Image: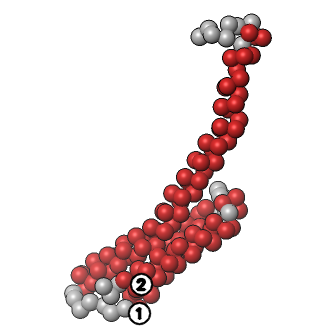
């Protein structure tokens, strides 16, 4: 339970980062600067790991167990910062698919609807199948 405030802070910061990237727009950072956005996300996670390790209580344990505990904290922080970014990416993907479907409806469904009427003009029977 003592990690919850740190995880919530990390998730909130990550959500703000996703909002900032959305506001900037992918056309400004994709594909050339994608590596910078990933590096910034990893730095954000590393920053929260550092905050957790320096501001929160540490377990009283052996050095080997402490190493495992620190790795566990790191993995937990990657999950906490990764979930908002992943949710944002899923939302962006769904938005792009919806836009593509609308584009296809506007441009290709219309053309397909009228193609049989053009077949006789091209010397083909409109009902013939290849």
**Dot 2: within a 10 Å radius of its alpha carbon, few (fewer than 14), some, or many (20 or more) residues?**
some
Q: Is residue 122 above or below residue 38?
A: above
Q: Is residue 60 left or right of residue 82?
A: left
Residue position marked by numbered label 1 in the rendering: 55
Residue 22 location (% of width, % of height): 63, 66
Mark 1 vs mark 2: which is more N-terminal? Answer: 2
Q: Quadrant of residue 34?
A: bottom right
Left or right? Give the position of 18 relative to 126. left
Q: Residues within 10 Å of mark 1 (few under 14, many from 20)?
A: few
> Is residue 40 shown to the viewer in this render?
no
Q: Quadrant of the C terminus?
A: top right
In this view, the residue in front, 4 or 31, is 4
Q: How many marks?
A: 2
User: Which residue in the rendered view is the most extreme toward the right?
Assistant: 121
Residue 6's tag is 2
Query: x and y percent of residue 3 in the render?
Result: 35, 84
Q: Which mark is residue 108?
A: none
Q: Nearer the viewer, residue 34 or 7?
A: 7
Q: Where 99 sits versus 120, above or below? A: below
Can the viewer see residue 60 in this picture?
yes
Tag 1's secondary structure? helix
Residue 52, x across and y down, in percent: 40, 86
**Residue drawn at (42%, 73%), measured in percent from left and top?**
80
Q: Pick the quarter of the image with the N terminus.
A: bottom left
**What kind of element bears circle 2?**
helix
Name the residue: 67% across, 11% down.
126
User: Who's the residue at 61% across and 42% down the image?
Assistant: 101
The Cα–Cα distance between marks 1 and 2, rounded to whole angstroms, is 9 Å
- Depicted 15 relative to depicted 119: above or below: below
Q: Do tag 1 and tag 2 residues touch (Cβ < 8 Å)?
A: yes
Looking at the picture, how far across and down is residue 58, in whole percent?
31, 91
């Amino acid at each position: 339970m003592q990690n919850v405030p740190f995880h919530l802070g990390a998730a909130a910061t990550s959500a703000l980062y996703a909002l900032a990237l959305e506001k900037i727009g992918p056309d400004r950072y994709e594909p050339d600067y994608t590596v910078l956005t990933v590096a910034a996300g990893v730095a954000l996670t590393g920053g929260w790991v550092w905050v957790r390790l320096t501001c929160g209580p540490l377990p009283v344990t052996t050095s080997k167990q402490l190493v495992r505990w620190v790795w566990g904290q790191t993995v937990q922080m990657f999950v906490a910062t990764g979930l908002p970014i992943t949710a944002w990416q899923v939302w962006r993907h769904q938005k792009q698919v919806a836009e593509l479907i609308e584009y296809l409806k506007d441009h290709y469904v219309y053309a397909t609807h009228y193609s049989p009427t053009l077949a006789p003009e091209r010397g083909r029977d409109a009902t013939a199948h290849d």
